[in-house]
Amino acid sequence: MKISDLILTANHNLFRNKTRTFLTILAIFIGSFTIILSNAINTGVNDFIDKQVESIGGDGYIEVAPKAVYEQLEALTSAKVQEYSEDAKTVENSTFDDETIKKLSAIDGVDSLNPYSLVTVDYITTNKTDKNYKVTLTILPDDSLKIDMVAGKQVSNNTSDYEIMITEDYVEPLGFESAESAVGQELQIAVPNTLKCMMTSDRKTCQTVVTAKISGVAATGVMSIGAGTRANTALYNYLVDLQYDGLPESQKMAYMATGHIDPVKEDAIRKAFEDEGFTIMTIDDEVGMIRTFFDVILIVFNIFGAIALLAAAIGIINTLFMSVQERTREIGLEKAMGMSNTKIFLSFSCEAILLGFWGSVIGILISMAIGYGANALAHQTFLSDFPTFQLVVFNPVNMTVITGIIMLIAFIAGTAPAYRASKQNPINSLRYE
Amino acid sequence: MNTIIEAKNLTKVYGKRSTAFTALKDIDLCIGQGESVAIVGKSGSGKSTLMHLLALLDKPTKGQIFIDGVNSTKLGAHALNRIRNRKFGFVFQQFFMNVNDSVLDNVILPLKIAKVGRFKRKKLALDALKTVDLDEKAKNKAKDLSGGQKQRVCIARAIVNNPEIIFADEPTGNLDSATGDKITDLLFKLNKEKGVTLIIVTHDEDLAKLCSRIVRISDGKIISDQAVSKDQRKESSKRWEKEAARVKKANEGKAN
């Protein structure tokens, strides 16, 4: 018998007893469905995290802040009384002065380090709305960072024009109909001058309103170091000047910095920065926890799926043993007609593999139907702020590997019945009542 | 006449030591091409065992079987399968059909095993069905056929690979005499027109007398091996015709 005939005949034989075959496939489906859907969710989450990571510049991107800032935060939450020491680093003496920058940049593996001062913006608004909105404005320090954009382009540092990008959740409040219609429009930013505002109670007299062009709308991110409301260097520096005008230079000192490092040397660099009184934060620090959480969920669901598949494998053994018994005379006849033991073995193995195959295919189809349905539903409800986040992503390689593994399990389960069929004596089989 | 099957000192023992049972003892038999041989005996005489050995479905404990001069006892499983697939056709008392499959699929089975291509095997199977006058039923399910039609499908299945020998085990055993007659006619027609060697196992004396030779078996030994004279064959075939006519009449009477 040719292999193609063997497969077609096996498939035909399977559906002779429809109920039994259906139930066996159902058992396999429960396992394959669990594994496929949990893998798809994991792929979806990881895809999203990868996109976010990419939007911050991938591996090697770091944010640097004085250790003292974290220590102060820790002191707020812990009841431990600490002894004062004059040598201890404080927020004030942990700034990025030229000397510190030079020292930190010299550390092996540090590619770049760009300090920036913090700007506190009072509000942003447009001429399309009467309301003013609070915002945390940051700088896009590096053009190489690729932000996940919904419309328009990310801000460019290669221009002296004032450019700003907003996140999607600001589109509607600022009076725009859609993200696309916001691109190219003007935005007003109110920035206070620290010195003037200390001397007056009328906030308006110490504010300066700066107009900038909206270059694009970024997708909402889940991480603090992700996409956000960001200004280009020209705008940001102008805002810094406005805010700190009149204050001594030391007040202008930067507390934050971004940069790039060689990810391989991360541990050594982290230690070197710690010694200098700075804490670095990489993307892994931020997303590692999320990834681990979803990986654990994936493992748990895969174990459930594996247990279901084990039970299904026993179902396959049972189904095929019944089939061998029922078709004893048929096997005898085929052997009398010159079918070899190997081919008899293969024909039953084929049935087992096909059971696995159909179980997986149905698992994939139903997971896809439910997955895409859930995607659409999620985007209308709780994920409406994250248009680029696909809850489930079906990776063809994963699907193929899972199908292959399930077919292998089915084949192994089918070996015992197939072996029994192949060893049957044709004469006894023909006499079988 | 060329020898097509030759058995030398065939012995078959079932079981071991204390439970050993000798089904066949030192059988010598030579069958020529184009012969029609009836193997006759009571149940338990060893006639079925002999057929199984001759058809290479089982291995003798002792002795050799030569098919077209080739010693089959020295052949491997693959070669034996090939001989059965290419040279032999089988007709069984209980039909052994896949009743849920179509008539055509049942007839195609030996060709599928022989790896014949899709279109060629369909054509050959339809030709075989035409020979047994059932080509119109090709698409029907086998379970919808009558007993006689089923056995005719089995004959079509036995001849579809153009075999040299047809082994028939009680081919009319499950049929009434009128339909049995039609089956017998078909088998002997193939024997006469195509020169197919017939080996029929039966306990029906009338059927046996239609053959050119009767081999009688009792207790695992050949007790007689006689050619059937032409007169005897004619008479037997007349009796068959009479019987058939009687049954036909009776059936018509019932129908009216």
Image (cartoon, coloured by chain):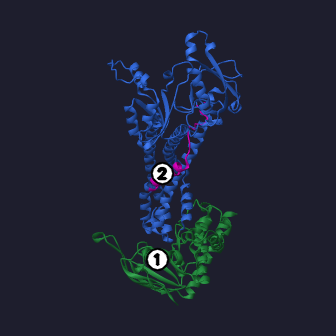
Q: Nearer the viewer, residue A272 or A408?
A: A272
Separation (CA) of disc 2 from disc 1: 36 Å
In percent of the image, x 50 and y 21: which residue is there? A251
- On the image, the x and y values in percent for residue A161 come to 66, 32
- On the image, the x and y values in percent for residue A221 come to 56, 32
User: Which amino acid type is marked by label 1?
Assistant: Ala
Q: Which chain is blue?
A: A
Is B82 magenta? The answer is no
Does residue A384 appear anywhere in the picture? no
Q: Is residue B142 shown above or below A373?
A: below
User: Which amino acid type is marked by label 2?
Assistant: Ile
Q: Is residue B45 shown above or below A197?
A: below
Subunit ID for the residue under disc 2: A
Q: State left or right for residue A212 relative to residue A432.
A: right
Q: Do labels 2 and 1 share a chain?
A: no
Chain B's colour is: green
In percent of the image, x 43 and y 50: which residue is there? A314
Number of residues whose C-alpha sits closer than 10 Å to that of mark 2, classed few (under 14), some (14–19) or many (20 or more): many
Q: Which of A63 and A295 is in front in this view?
A: A63
Q: Which residue lies furthest to the bottom in this view?
A: B1
Q: Mark 1 points at which residue?
A: B79
Q: Name the residue under label 2.
A: A406
Where are the magenta residues, as a range? A383-411
Does residue B74 appear anywhere in the picture? yes
